[in-house]
Amino acid sequence: MKVLIVGSGGREHAIAWSVAKSKRVDKIYCAPGNGGISEYAECVDIPAMEFEKLADFAEEKKVDLTIIGMDDPLVGGIVDVFEERGLKVFGPRKNAAVIEGSKSFSKDLMKKYGIPTCHYETFHSPEEALLYLGSCQFPVVLKADGLALGKGVLICRTLEEAEAGVATLMLDKQFGDAGNTIVIEDFITGREVSVLCFCDGTHIAPMTSAQDHKRAKDGDQGLNTGGMGTFSPSPFYTDEIREFCEKNIYQPTMDAMKAEGRDFTGILFVGLMLTEDGPRVLEYNARFGDPEAQVVLPRMKNDIIDVIEACLEGRLDRLQLEFEDNAAVCVVLASDGYPEHYEKGKKITGLEQFQDKEGYYVFHAGTKLTPEGVVTNGGRVLGVTAKGKDLKEARANAYRATELIHFENKYMRSDIGKAIDELS
Ligand code: GLY
């Protein structure tokens, strides 16, 4: 079987690794891919937003299945283009990917169907938003409606900060048209948990839990990033919480999307906040998390192709997802200065030590293969994942592994998974 993966980050590397393990797959392409993905896949220089060119490629190479890793092509309708051309593709159609593409859509969906989330209001003009802020308790959370590389969320502690935030999103348009509409939400606190779920349009199968660390610096300080590291499972996501979410969040979301004529097939990423009043949905995404995929997929026992086919054939309810009874931690090695200014093109050494090293994985995010070897090519460079019998062991293994990799301006947080220490 031939598989094409669309995307170029650490998440797509983890997907490619998982697909490469399948006995049913004999050829993998990745468009556009990266230096690390080329170990498993032939990387093809077609940008992820060139839907017709990607479909031409899939047709020409007789690709049996295309997996879309990234949000932009999903929200832009790549799945519809592939389906119109009779090509098998895994991901939600445009009318379902809107669950990630529009924050106001997802908030309205939750309100209409009674799915637990926090109070919010939607605004289409800065004047209305500023007027509303006058009646708010602070902090509040401002969210750009559209896609903003995970960065269009501002936590504002005072009225002044919130007014400046409205200007940033709606007047200065820091995130372009994504800020034409904004959502203003109550600020809620608790543990964040990410639960990625396989979906077949009707049934939903949640995977093991994970937690991301979105801020650039230790102690959750600094700017928001695409994610600086993850651990899985989250010890805060107890069986009781899982059962609550299955009953009140996951299946109700599938049913709500179906009732709206937007059947969701693909990966639904549910971002939860475990508050004192119970779990609340912070956000939905329409794809695997990055770097959540880097800790969840290495723990999955199923053949990913079997699961994806069950999704595409609407028989997910007849398949049992299985995860190893262990833990994984992923520490992101970034270029110092990320997410603002940083240099690229630095030679990376030490990668060869991970060749076939059981329980250790180096997923490439921003790298490039050059005649001189692998060099840095982005803010987030590598995700170093290690497994262990429990989170403590996985964390110690992951941090030890980061010491084996070197490049100039290497930067990482030193407290990924540290929250688990509080439990011991
Ligand atoms: N790790 C957060 C995301 O993938 O959006």
Image (cartoon, rainbow, N blue to C red):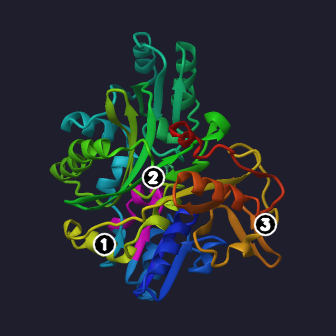
In percent of width and height, residue 237 lies at 38, 44
Q: Say left or right for 216 vs 125.
A: right
Mark 1 or mark 2, earlier in chain: 1
Eyeballing the image, is 219 above or below 310? above
Q: Say left or right for 360 vs 152.
A: right
Amino acid type assigned to the residue bearing label 1 in the image: Glu
Q: Which residue is the site of mark 3?
A: 348
Q: Which residues are the magenta region?
A: 66-80
Judge: label 2 CB < 8 Å from ligand 1: no
Q: Quadrant of residue 188?
A: top left
Question: Could you say which is closer to the camera, residue 46 or residue 279?
Answer: 279
Q: Residue at (33%, 36%) from the top-left corner?
A: 279
Neighbours of disc 2 within 10 Å: few (<14), some (14-19), many (20+): many
Q: Please tell me whether mark 2 sits on a helix, a strand or a loop.
A: loop
Q: Nearer the viewer, mark 1 or mark 2?
A: 2
Query: Is residue 162 magenta-colored?
Result: no
Amino acid type assigned to the residue bearing label 2 in the image: Pro
Q: Which residue is the site of mark 2?
A: 233
Question: Could you say which is closer to the camera, residue 278 or residue 165?
Answer: 278
> What residue occupies the far top of the structure in this picture?
134
Question: Could you say which is closer to the camera, residue 265 or residue 270?
Answer: 270
> What residue occupies the far left of the structure in this picture?
259
Q: Please tell me whether mark 1 sits on a helix, a strand or a loop.
A: helix
In percent of width and height, residue 269 lies at 39, 52
Marks counted in the figure total 3
Q: Quadrant of residue 368?
A: bottom right
In percent of width and height, residue 197 lies at 34, 57
Neighbours of disc 3 within 10 Å: few (<14), some (14-19), many (20+): some
